Amino acid sequence: MAGTQTASRPGRSIAVLAVLTALVFALIYFVAPDRIGTQPVTTADKYQPRLGLDLEGGTSVILKPRVAPGKTGTITKDSLNQAVGIIRQRVDSFGVAEAEVTTAGQNITISVPGKQDKNILATVQQTAELRFRPVLLAGPGGPVVTAPSPSPSGSASPSGSPSPSASRAASPSPSPSTTNNGRAIPRTVKAGTVKATGATPTATPPPSASATAPATPATGAAGDISPALQQEYARLDCSKTAALQQALRKPGADDPKKSLVTCLRDGTEKYILGPAEVLGTDVKTASAGLANNSQGVATGGWQVNLTFTGKGRVKFADVTRRLAALSDPRNRFGIVLDGLVVSAPGLNNGPIVGGSAQITGSFTQAEATDLANVLKYGALPLTFDAGQVQEVSATLGGDQLRAGLIAGAIGLFLVVLYSLLYYRGLGLVTVASLGVSAILTYGLVVLLGWQLGFRLSLAGIAGLIVAIGITADSFIVFFERLRDEVRDGKTLRVAVETGWVRARRTILAADFVSFLAAMILYILSAGGVRGFAFTLGLTTLLDIAVVFMFTKPLVTILARTSFFGQGSKWSGLDPERLGSTRRSLLTPAPRKRAPAAPATGTATSTPKEA
């Protein structure tokens, strides 16, 4: 029987749980960063939970909306609410960060907990509309000595400009080429999982060995590079991206109908880009995933998967048909957000007409996730100017946190006291199980804080306090089933197994309902309520692990001892107190003999006569 197998090796389950607990705390040390910004992270800091905005304070950014360049209209409440939703999604993409995104008049206030997190702040301050612009010229991010002048053929030949081998960012070979800095910039766009019929790849012609300038600019008004753009490109120094981004936020500086001179956001490459041809609103969804080769086998790298809307599919197909016929860097397009290029992939596999695409290259998981979030949540209905970034104090002081912890301690004390008074020796099992659950919960809260950005707010602490009752309920269900089996006259070892079989279905059903409620609350809520739902769901799952891997095996071990097996009055399993007629739980209760059946027949005896 399954119950017998479980009973024979209870120590194995407890050992596995101990190893998993040790692994959680070991992972914390390796996952936690050594520095946050300029501040070092000590070993003691690594093992402390990250607190939310209400308990630790954080950083506040005010975004001031304005109508995007080239557009008319007014700032409406609906557009502000839509912007709040997109910005909240951007922040939430970093995990349960307990950030607050609210409106104050016509401004949007974003409060991010903890010390300044450059990744989160950079994401929420990327306020311009996402745009796809064709690349007209590309090169290293530093300025050139002499301003470029148009060559007789009409191509730009800046003095000191990179050779094609140095500026090339996407080559036909699978391995990415690099800039003169050695940084891999190549990003290649190819058709998605399903290619549309008739999409014939167009090979990119290799540059001539004698070429000393980038490819000839495309003809037409949209593709011409004016002398003014060439001079601006030559002077541009991409080591000063913050100043460039601030300048591009000025009204009219980032006009989608005009060409743009800008930099890759890490400053290693600069571009002259044509007018925007596809917008962020044309992207339906984007996600990061493991890259596969042509045979569908994972290569170990990461890629970004895009899906376009109906109109976006047509627009993107038209652009890629034109760009795929050009040579590098003209077969690339810049993905621009807030004036800076997020990525500049090339088209080395022909036009993309199926409505889905993949951006591949030397992505790390973090880079792929970041680009996917930009593509997915980049299209804001308004353009914003980022106001001053300032530190904010905790909205709740240490007194409130102390009060919450005291409330949790009181609740835990009452549960332990009730267990000891009512279940006596079995109450010690409750205390031990709650202790194991607390250690695991603490470890996971700290680990998820560093890994997923989870921050513990006062609402999250409330979820942990509620979980004490949920965990205690599981113990009570098991103990009551066990006592019922003892009342029926079974030995303690048998009662443990049969009682567990009946109790575990009830425990799983109750925990499933609790976890389902937490999951729905997490999906439909925002801010601090999500923190409450997250901790409630986490502790519900831990309750199942602790009951199955610690509580039940521990009771199995205790059932083999004389203290519990003989039914001591302090064990909580005293047969007399439970209403059983037996004196010991080590042997089954004797069966009562059935009364003898009366003899059948018609013979009767008559008394003798005197």
Image (tube, rainbow, N blue to C red):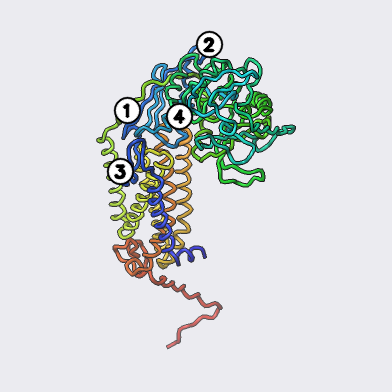
Q: Disc 1 on helix, strand or loop?
A: strand
Choose the circle earlier in sequence order: 2 or 4.
2
| Label placed on residue 123 | 4
- Amino acid type assigned to the residue bearing label 3 in the image: Gly
| Label placed on residue 408 | 3
Q: Disc 2 on helix, strand or loop?
A: loop
Choose the circle earlier in sequence order: 3 or 4.
4
The residues bearing labels 2 and 1 have C-alpha atoms spaced at a distance of 35 Å
Query: Which residue, given by chain and number where applicable, does mark 2 sit on?
Result: 72
The residues bearing labels 3 and 1 have C-alpha atoms spaced at a distance of 30 Å
Choose the circle earlier in sequence order: 3 or 1.
1
- Amino acid type assigned to the residue bearing label 4 in the image: Thr
Residues marked 3 and 1 touching at CB (< 8 Å): no
Choose the circle earlier in sequence order: 3 or 2.
2
The residues bearing labels 3 and 4 have C-alpha atoms spaced at a distance of 36 Å
Place of residue 433 in the rendered image (x, y in percent of width and height, measured from the top left)? 36, 54
Choose the circle earlier in sequence order: 2 or 1.
2
